[in-house]
């Protein structure tokens, strides 16, 4: 423990984690050909539009901090993410919009707000110019998300905090971007199923990163080809119209002919193009990606177990295959409970309140991914699984409340009605998960900034000064807000 850290309070990072943060070095690769030959040259020029005073996500692609880098005894952060109420001022907003990562995320927020206004139930007609705008905003998010690492290398602001921020923003985008996607396709109750497609691949990739300590993007991946495909979906929908996705695969006469020969073919013929779009994604994208991540994690865990046994080192529970399997439990519970609530809800809570539904889902998913990535950065896995299950409290209550009328249908005549009103439960779910994720985001930034002596939303290191009696009093580190 460095001098001065004993008097400080750390919320999510322990002593071992702080030492690991100072030694951390990013490891990863992107094998996408589209990224290498088309987008990388564009991003290299686009990043030059930003001044050197604008920080990136501080993604640790560049040279890591040395192991002997001293940890600051005290930090007074001027940024918005600071647990000191006296320092949370309107100036904090300037730092948020001065950061490339969060500027990119604002494009996603704008898309969600527009989808909420134009199609609150994800079934209403959306003007074609708005759908084109969805494509543009998503492309801007992808661009800003890609260049923030380059900006971090330009400014020398690379740090582990950037990797955590980058994954957290991607987790938020992974969930919220389903809303404009569903609004453009008039998907309604299909939206949670499309969220399963995007979230499962992202969670499995983060799960692999936790055990391999490296992020390797395959030749076809979500951040590049996935987002470009989604942009193309918006443009195609704007061209053919939203109603195109609801058209059955076969005509009515063909369905009658199929029914005469095989009833199963009639069901297939009744599927819409939207149903086909959903069905093909699981065998083509989700399953191969999940299997690849699973095999990689199994090899990494078995290799670590073998090395520890060979070296006579004690084997921790977090190094076992059982722990690797248990880390999938929070995501499977979140996705299973979410889809079940949407299906069983007596009041059709989804899609009537789709945006509140996805907001709570966003907080829950981002918190699970954030806790796992923080444990990867700090190599501290104690208490990880219980902390990832915390967002499920009100979701579990809401699911039981929605399922109860179905379980007691024989004893309660009349229409199905939940014991508790579902909208207040949904709002409590949003508030609970929002508080959990907000507390995590604020305090983790505080912990890492205190450990590494960096700013959250500014370029530069903390400024130190020596007091008059340096031998008796530790040097303090202060952050002086810059008037913009």
Image (spheres, helix red, strand yellow):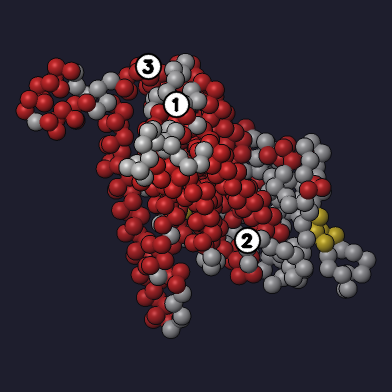
Return the residue at label 2: 12
Question: How would you rate the neighbour count of disc 2 (Cα within 10 Å): few for under 14, some for 14-19, many for 20 or more?
Answer: some
**For residue 459, side relative to residue 400 (left or right):** right
Residue at x-position 19% and y-position 22%: 250
Q: Which quadrant is home to the C terminus?
A: top right
Residue at x-position 46% and y-position 81%: 313
Residue 483 in the image: above or below residue 394: above
Element carrying mark 1: loop
Question: Upstream in the sequence, badge 1 or badge 2?
Answer: 2
Q: Which mark is residue 122?
A: 1
Question: How would you rate the neighbour count of disc 1 (Cα within 10 Å): few for under 14, some for 14-19, many for 20 or more?
Answer: many
Return the residue at label 3: 241
Question: Upstream in the sequence, badge 1 or badge 3?
Answer: 1
Question: How would you rate the neighbour count of disc 3 (Cα within 10 Å): few for under 14, some for 14-19, many for 20 or more?
Answer: some
**For residue 414, side relative to residue 39 (left or right):** left
Give the x, y percent position of residue 115: 51, 25
Q: Which quadrant is home to the N terminus?
A: bottom right
Q: Where is residue 207, by image quadrant?
A: bottom left
Residue at x-position 67% and y-position 58%: 447
Give the x, y percent position of residue 383: 54, 65
Q: Which residue is the extreme one toward the right? A: 468
Q: Which residue is the extreme one toward the bottom? A: 312
Question: Upstream in the sequence, badge 3 or badge 2?
Answer: 2
**For residue 79, side relative to residue 371 (left or right):** right
């Amino acid at each position: 423990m460095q001098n001065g850290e004993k008097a400080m309070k750390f919320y999510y990072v322990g002593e071992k984690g702080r030492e690991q943060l100072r030694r951390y070095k990013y490891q990863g690769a992107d094998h996408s050909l589209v990224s290498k030959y088309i987008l990388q040259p564009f991003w290299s020029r686009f990043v030059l539009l930003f001044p050197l005073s604008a920080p990136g996500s501080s993604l640790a692609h560049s040279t890591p901090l040395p192991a002997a880098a001293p940890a600051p005894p005290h930090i007074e952060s001027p940024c918005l993410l600071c647990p000191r109420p006296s320092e949370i001022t309107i100036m904090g907003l300037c730092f948020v919009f001065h950061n490339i990562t969060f500027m990119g995320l604002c494009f996603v927020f704008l898309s969600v707000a527009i989808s909420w206004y134009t199609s609150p139930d994800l079934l209403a007609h959306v003007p074609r110019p708005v759908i084109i705008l969805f494509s543009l905003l998503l492309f801007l998010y992808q661009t800003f998300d890609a260049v923030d690492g380059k900006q971090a290398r330009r400014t020398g602001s690379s740090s582990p905090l950037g990797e955590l921020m980058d994954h957290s923003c991607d987790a938020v985008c992974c969930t919220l971007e389903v809303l404009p996607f569903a609004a453009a396709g008039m998907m309604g109750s299909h939206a949670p199923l499309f969220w399963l497609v995007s979230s499962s691949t992202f969670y499995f990739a983060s799960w692999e990163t936790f055990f391999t300590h490296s992020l390797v993007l395959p030749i076809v991946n979500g951040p590049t080809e996935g987002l470009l495909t989604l942009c193309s979906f918006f443009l195609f929908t704007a061209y053919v119209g939203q109603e195109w996705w609801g058209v059955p695969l076969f005509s009515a006469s063909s369905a009658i002919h199929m029914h005469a020969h095989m009833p199963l073919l009639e069901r297939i013929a009744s599927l819409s193009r939207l149903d086909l779009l959903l069905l093909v994604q699981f065998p083509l994208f989700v399953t191969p990606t999940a299997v690849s991540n699973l095999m990689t994690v199994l090899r990494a865990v078995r290799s670590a177990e073998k090395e520890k046994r060979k070296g006579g080192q004690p084997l921790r529970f977090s190094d076992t295959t059982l722990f690797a399997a248990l880390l999938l439990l929070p995501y499977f519970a979140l996705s299973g409970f979410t889809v079940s609530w949407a299906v069983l809800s007596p009041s059709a809570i989804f899609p009537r309140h789709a945006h509140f539904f996805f907001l709570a889902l966003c907080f829950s998913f981002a918190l699970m991914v954030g806790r796992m990535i923080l444990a990867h950065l700090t190599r501290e896995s104690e208490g990880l699984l219980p902390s990832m299950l915390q967002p499920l409290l009100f979701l579990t209550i809401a699911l039981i409340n929605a399922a109860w009328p179905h379980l007691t249908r024989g004893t309660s005549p009349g229409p199905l009605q939940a014991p508790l009103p579902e909208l207040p439960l949904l709002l409590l779910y949003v508030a609970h998960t929002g508080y959990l994720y907000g507390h995590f985001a604020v305090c983790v930034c505080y912990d890492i900034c205190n450990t590494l002596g960096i700013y959250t939303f500014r370029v530069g290191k903390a400024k130190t000064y020596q007091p008059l009696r340096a031998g008796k009093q530790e040097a303090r580190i202060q952050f002086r807000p810059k008037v913009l």
